[in-house]
Image: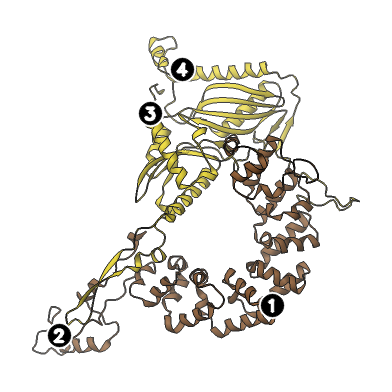
Amino acid sequence: MFSRVLKDTSFSRYICRYVQNKNASIIQQYKVPNNIGSDTEANALQKVDKDLSGLTPYYPKSFNLAGYVNTSETLQKLIQLNVNLSQIEKKPHLAEKILKLNFERDVQGHIFFLKDYVDIEEIGSFITKNPLILTELLDDLRVRINYLESKCFSETQIKRIITENPFWLMFSTTRIDRRFGFYQEKFILKGKDVRLLATKQPKLITYNLHHVNTNIFALKEEMGFNQEELKQLVLKKPKLYMLGHKTLLERFNYVHNEMQIPHHRILEDPEVLLSRNFRIKQRHLFLSRLGRAQYNPKKENYVPVKSLVEGTDIEFCKQYAKCNVADYNLFLKTL
Amino acid sequence: MVGKRASGSPDGKRSPLRCQPRGLRWDTSSASHFTGCLNLHTKTQQCKHCCFTAGLASKMVVAIRADLAQDLNALPDRPIEQRVEIVGATNEPMTVKLVPNYADDPLACGPRYIHDDFRCSWATHLGLFSSGVLLLGINDGTKLTYNLNTSRLTRAFKVHGQLGKATDTFFWNGKTMERSTYSHVTREKIDRVVAHMQSSHQKTIYEMTGLHLESQTLYDLASKGPIRPSDNKLPVLYGIKCVHYKPPDFTLEIQSVNEYDKYFWALVHDLGVQLKTTAHCTAVQCLRQGRFDVNLALLRKHWQLEHIVDNMNACRIIMEEFEGVLKPDARLTA
C-alpha cells in the first residue's frame, strides 16, 4: 500500500519549473526582465539572490489524501486527532470537501463543540465515520442538541446518542421528531420508552424506515409475534429491526421450527436471533448428538437457549455440553 | 409464512408449523473445516500453509483474505518513516530537518495489508453443498495448488443418501419426484450393486490406457499403483463401499479422481434405481485429498493468522515428508 503513496516533493521544490503558489509578486518580478528582453541574459540557471522559499511546484495529482498530507496542516492535525483519512477518501466527494477545509476556520469550532458530547479519544473515529459534520453549521448542531434537551434527555443520554450514532446530528430536528413519532406510533411507546430506545440504539432512529417497516412486517406477519411482543423486542434488542429481512427469517425458522423453541422463550432471549445461524446450528446439533438439547426450564438437564450464542466454544463445552472442546471440534469436522 | 401463529387455538399456543421439511441438514455454511494448501507470501515473511474448508470456495476465499489482512494489520507496525525537509530562506544558510512522514501513517495511506495482497486459489472444487477438505493456496501457494490439481490426487468422500424418495436435483433440496418402498433392500444388495459399479470403473480405466488387457505392459503399469486419468474430464472411482446402512439412510465411502458433487448425487440416484427403489443424496463430505486429511483441517472459527500459519507449516512438513505427494509414481492414462 505504501508504495502507492506519492513521494513527497519537498526536495524538488528548488529545482526548476517554478510555479508561483503563494507569493505572486516574486514570480512577477522574476519574469519581467525576461519579457522585455533586457541585455542581461535571463535563463533558468541564472543565480538569484532573492528568497525563493515561497515558490513551490503545483501539487501533483494524487488518488489519495496521503499525497497531500505532508503539505497540509489541516490534514496533519486531523491525523493527530486519529481521523482515518484512508477511510474518508474512499468516497471522493468527501475527500474533496475535506481538502477544502481550513483547520482554524472550519474544524476547530466543531471539535470544541463535539468534545462536550464525545470522548476525546472517540473524536477521531467520529469524524472518520461522518466527516460531513465539519461542514454543518455550528448553530444547527446546537439547535439539534437543544431539541434533545427539550425532550427531557439527560446529559449522559445525549452523550451516548451522539457518540453511538455520529450521523444523528446531521438530521434536522423536524426529521428526528418525525422519526420519534414513527416509533412511538408503531410500537405504542410511552415517552420514557422512546427515550430508552433512542439511548439504547440511537442508530435505529436514523435507520432506513422502509427497512424497519419490512422487519416489523416479518416479525409480525411472518413470524407471528403480536404487538405487545414487538414492543418488548424493540426495547430489549432494537438491533433486530436493523437486520436483513432474509437472515432474520432464516434464523427464526431454524430456532422456531427446527429447534422447536416457542415464541415466549425467544422473547426471553431475543439475542438468539442476533447470532449468525451457523453458530446456533453447530451448537444445537452437537447438543442433540449428546442428547442434551433440552431447552425447557421446567425439565431436568435444562440448557438455556442463550448458551447457544453466548461465550466462547470452550465455555460452552465446559458449562453446557460437559465435554472437552476438542470433542466439539472433532464433531464439527463430521458435519 | 414461516411461524405464523395459529390464531384459533384456544390456549393461545403457537402451532409448531414446519414449513420447510428440510432433509438432513448437512448444511455447508455450518460445516466448515478448512484446511488447504496455502503458501503465504507476504511482504514481511514467506511461509507455506495448508488449509481445508467447506462451502462456497469463493466466499471462503473472501473470508480468508479479510482475516489475514485484519490479523496482519493488528500486529505491531513498523515505525513510521522519516522524511528530510530543507527549510528556510533560499538566500541564507538553510536548515535540514528530519520530520515524521505523515504520508506513511496507516491513517493516511491505509492499512499495511489489504485483501488484494493475498491471491488465493483452490486445488479442486468442492461443490456448493459439499463439506470437508479443501486445499487452498495463498500467493506463491497458488502454484502449489496448480501442481496438486494436475497430479490428480485421489479424494476420499463420504456420501450420505436416503432411500425411498427421488428428487429432481438428486439432492435433498430438490423437488420430490417420486416415492417408493425400500423394505426389500438389504445391506447385501447395496454391497452387490456398489461392487459392480466399482469393477466397471476399474475396467474403464484399464481400457482408457489403450493397452491390451492381457499384456505385460499393462501389468507393469498397474503394479505401480492406481492408474490415474491424465485429463480432468472423466470421473474415476477407485473404491466404493457401503459403510453404514440403517434404513432408509445409508452412507457410502468413495475414493475417486475427477469427481464432482453432482456426479455423486447422480450416483446415489442410480444406486436407487438399480436397487429397484429410489434414492437421493443428503450430504457429500470430503474426508481426504491425497495426504491431506480432515484432521489437519482448519475449522471456520480457526481461520486466523495464528492457526493458518501453523497449518501451513503442518502441510509443508507433509509435502516434504512425502515428496511423491505432488508426483505420484503411478502412470497417467493417455
Instruction: State the separation of the CA atoms marked 4 and 3.
Output: 30 Å
Report in which chain the residue with disc 1 lies: A
What tint does the image give chain A?
Answer: brown
Q: Which mark is residue B321?
A: 3
Residue nearest the viewer, comparing B209 with A261? A261
Q: Residues within 10 Å of mark 4 (few under 14, many from 20)?
A: some
On the image, numbered disc 2 is attached to which residue?
A: A49
Q: Nearer the viewer, mark 2 or mark 3?
A: 3
Q: What residue appears at the point 14 percent right and 84 percent down from the top-left corner? A: A48
Identify the amino acid type marked 3.
Glu
Please tell me whether mark 4 sits on a helix, a strand or a loop: helix
Quarter where residue A198 is shown: bottom right
Report in which chain the residue with disc 2 lies: A
Residue A26 pos. (x, y %):
23, 87
Q: What residue appears at the point 42 percent right and 36 percent down from the top-left corner? A: B314
Identify the amino acid type marked 1.
Asp
Q: Which mark is residue B206?
A: 4
Report in which chain the residue with disc 4 lies: B
Question: Can you say which quadrant of the picture contains the N terminus of chain A?
Answer: bottom left
Please tell me whether mark 1 sits on a helix, a strand or a loop: helix
Q: Is residue B19 left or right of residue B288?
A: right
What tint does the image give chain B?
Answer: yellow
Please tell me whether mark 3 sits on a helix, a strand or a loop: helix
- Can residue A182 be seen here? The reply is yes
Identify the amino acid type marked 2.
Asp
Q: Is residue B232 left or right of residue B131?
A: left
On the image, numbered disc 1 is attached to which residue?
A: A177
Please tell me whether mark 2 sits on a helix, a strand or a loop: loop
* Same chain letter for marks 4 and 3: yes
The answer to whether residue A310 is above or below residue A81 is above
Q: Residues within 10 Å of mark 1 (few under 14, many from 20)?
A: some
Identify the amino acid type marked 4.
Tyr
